[in-house]
Image (cartoon, helix red, strand yellow):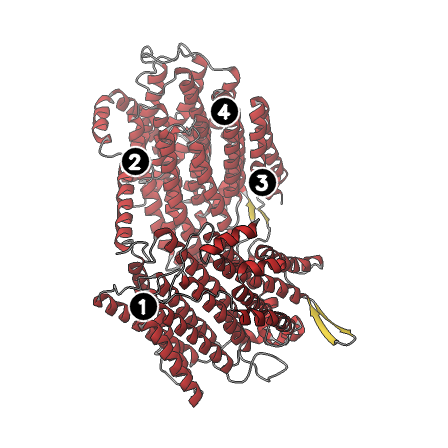
Amino acid sequence: MSLMLAILTPFCGAPLTFWIARRSRKWGTFTALGVCLLAALWLAPMAPAIFGGAVSIQYLSWIPAADIDLTLRFDGLGLLFAQMILGIGALVIIYAFYYLSEKDSLGRLYALLLLFMGAMLGVVLAENLIILLVFWELTSLTSFMLIAYWRHDSEARRGAQLALVITGAGGMALLAGFVLLGQMAGSFELTTILLRGDAIRAADNYPLMLLLILLGAFTKSAQFPFHFWLPRAMAAPTPVSAYLHSATMVKAGVFLLARLFPVLSGTLLWSWWVGGIGLITLLLAAVIALLKHDLKGLLAYSTISHLGLIVALFGIGTPLAAVAGVFHLINHAIFKAGLFMSVGVIDHECGTRDMRRINGLWHSMPHTAILAMVATAAMAGVPLANGFLSKEMFFAEAVSVGGQMRFGWFLPAIVTLAGIFAVAYSLRFIHDVFFNGEPVNLPKIPHEPPRFMKIPIEILVLLCLLIGIVPQYSVEPILAVAAGAVLQGPLPEHDLAIWHGVSPALFMSLIALVGGLLIYLGRQPLFALHTHLEVRLDGRKIFEALLVKILAGAAHITNFIDRSSLQQQVSLLVGATLCLGVAGMLPGPGVLTKLPALLPVDAISLIMALVLAAAALRATIGHRQRLTALIMTGAVGLIMTLIFVKFSAPDLALTQLAVEVVTLILLLLALYFLPQSSPKESSPARRWRDGLLALLAGSGMSLLAFAVMTRRSTTISDYFIANSIGGGGGHNIVNVILVDFRGFDTLGEISVLAIAALGIFALMQNLKLKGLEQDAQGRPFDPDKYPLIMATFSRLLLPLALLVSVYIFLRGHNLPGGGFIAGLVTAIALILQYLTNGVVWTKKRLPAAQTHPLIAWGLLVAMLTGLGSWLFGRPFLTSAFGHWSLPLVGEFELASAMAFDLGVYLVVVGATLLILINLGLFKSSPAVREKKTWKS
Amino acid sequence: MEILIALIIGLLSGCGVYLLLQARTFSVVLGLTLLSYAINLFLFATGRLVIGQPPVLSAVSSPADPLPQALVLTAIVIGFAMTAFAIMLSLRAQAELGNDHVDGEQP
């Protein structure tokens, strides 16, 4: 539980901080810090046990059916990352207070930072891979909002969009990879997965799964060729860059590699892909970093390069390399966060980040200069700073692993070359900014920033030195426990001393230092080359060109399919469905295999089928004479009713009959306002095409239906049949299924019905239609709208019809009937009144039949019946029933399901009336006058 | 009998599809109606054809499969709502656009 609370704390703290920071910037900062502290306090009691090697798993059931539970895991790696996330987060919060100007909303920045912090904690503390992915995507989203913090800046918005697209696409790949991995391991829980490494590496899908997961990790950690989003993300405020783009979010990809290291690593594929991409990124980004004139651009590419270094270490795959990877991960987070903050100070003080203009700041801000220099020394790998130690481990691993393979000299060579460039860009940063003459027309006159703004940097720089000078006492415990969690096994011998004696690694460090100096001195030709190449090899430009191409392609496909003709589209749809159906059925067993005994055909059935066929064909062929076609359709519907009667479905027959009546009335009413016949406009070719499609679709359906009917039936209905009386208290199983077993579905269905009715109501608002003056032959209609005899009889019929519907409703639980059918019968009885007496006359006399309240009450009754079972501690819609006896009536049964059925009944009545009555209202011009009088 | 029902299902879906492909809204609505008959009958037939055994427990010994019936019952009602919505949409289109072509304009 405490892990969950730790993750939730920043999420809950974000709105609070936002609210407070809007009133007072200072108190907002304190609140944000308090949130970090509280989150840390939730974790702190467990830390000693974790240092002792324990792993804490906390479990909250969520979707057990899909093996997705809110399981969280707290181990060495999680502890290390939680420390970085909360620690550096707190420093960034202090720093941001001084960095942001009064104009910018500090509250929004804090709220977003805290949201990001919560998401990041979720990633590193997740035990279930799906949970991890959810938080992973949350980091992408929050980072999107953080990069676009300065909303007015189009560069920031585009950078944010780019980051979201790249990391979002990676997230999709990661989801697919996780699903594959989960299938291979049989679980999404890390504990299980970590134990099944051998089986997973041997699985057929391993390469695909690895590729997908690496896509996710590499896009997040800005590895080549997805690196280009990171420099563009530098449009974010510097505190955000310091936090997200150096210490935490970009480390999420590396974190994933570390987390799954025992499962995925150890194959040739892993070494080539991870190691290869890491090395390419390491070298390429180091070279580009030297050539950037923008301070944050330099740091961004240096970050990419260092991430490449860590990835390469994990790619090498030896235990010692993994330890070095974790070590460098810690070191990089510390020195790079410090560097970003220093750059933020410089930017803040100078008003620009262009190194060609910022020079000689040593005189105006010596304190900041010293801090930046120490951090830069760590970045370059100078002895006594922390970066030196991990880099030296890297060099040593490169030599020892390179020694074991063919062309092994290649590995140390690349690594040394990258080291040379790292030294060169570090030198450039220091020399250009703090020395190298006088500043070139800066917008502001630089001086030292506020005292407290430097505190976070000082803390980070101090940590650099502490780790660099006495690693055994400072970093060793956390490194050991984190590396242990990565390896899931015994730690290899590693020595964190500064002096290892004369070794190849020492020579490589020396070569890097000297070579870097030489490269820096001869940098001008490189700059020229870069200006030349930048135009052609800009990742973002390539990406944007690609995006334009994709959009054009999508538009092309859309235009091809959508020719703004519904007929075209429907025929494509039907054609595609046919193709899919054929493709799906082809591999199966033939349709006509092993015929079971069929039911015999009797004469009446045959005649009825022929009538149905004749009616359907008449409706289709003669569809241009609409009234005839409509009546033929009605005839088909009536024979459908008979089919249901024949094959033991009395409920369906009743429903079909009632619906048929309502539909026919509705369509007749509608036809009154539409043209009476369709023009002949289809070309013969189109008619042939339509006919062919129809023929194919019909044959396919026939074959499919026959195939289904002649196969052995297995059904899940036995449960319903067995429990209908005992569990649902009714003999009519269909009704019991509707109101009890699958009551939740029915609730959904009556909601759909209600929504459809309301939608129709909305469609009919302010509708102006012109009805017919005369029939198709040109004869005027009978002026007598409401024939007297019919009106009189229908009034007499009403109570009787209502009685019938009540009877059908009450018996529904045990005999054919129920809410749906009774509702339709009631609706028909009322509609008859409206038809024969006019809407206005009837509405005046039937105040109870207000359609909107009927629908609302129906839904409410159904919902409340369902909720009622909660009062008795049962799940939603559990039904209860009992038997009572009344004098005169005798024994009868009452079930709570009947109340639910009442809800169904009310909704059906309301919806049907709503649909039909309003159409009768705007019949002809006199009706408009009547409507007005009725309204008053 | 199974062959007969299968043929009916095929005929109804064929007619439904043909009408669905026509250019006027009213035909399309009729096509939808026929198609939903076909689909309902198909769903119903998945419970196999049984004569004289309605799923009412007091009346029979081995009742017909009640599940498809329950599904089809709601499908009929929802189908009515759909037909109603489609026809109202075409009325609205007629009122707003002055014609009843499915593309909203006379060719």
Left or right of A726, for residue A353:
left
Q: x and y percent of residue A625 in the render?
A: 33, 69
Provide the residue designation for mark 2: A540
Instruction: Establish if A775 lies above or below A413.
Output: below
Label 1 Cα crowd, 10 Å radius (few <14 / some 14-19 / many 20+): some
Q: Gap in Å between the C-alphas at discs 2 and 3?
A: 36 Å
**Kind of element beneath mark 1:** loop
Provide the residue designation for mark 1: A624
**Kind of element beneath mark 3:** helix
Residue kind at label 4, given as amino acid type: Ala
Label 4 Cα crowd, 10 Å radius (few <14 / some 14-19 / many 20+): many
Provide the residue designation for mark 4: A96
Residue A62 has which mark? none
Instruction: Establish if A536 lies above or below A26.
Output: below
Residue kind at label 2, given as amino acid type: Arg
Which residue extends farthest front? A783
Provide the residue designation for mark 3: A8
Q: Gap in Å between the C-alphas at discs 4 and 3?
A: 23 Å
Please state, as top left, top right, bottom left or bottom right, where the N terminus of chain A lies in the image: top right
State which tag comes first along the sequence, 3 or 1. 3
Splitting the image into 4 quarters, where does residue A545 fall?
top left
Relative depth, front residue between A143 and A784: A784
Residue kind at label 1, given as amino acid type: Arg
**Kind of element beneath mark 2:** helix
Query: Is the same chain shared between marks 3 and 1?
Result: yes
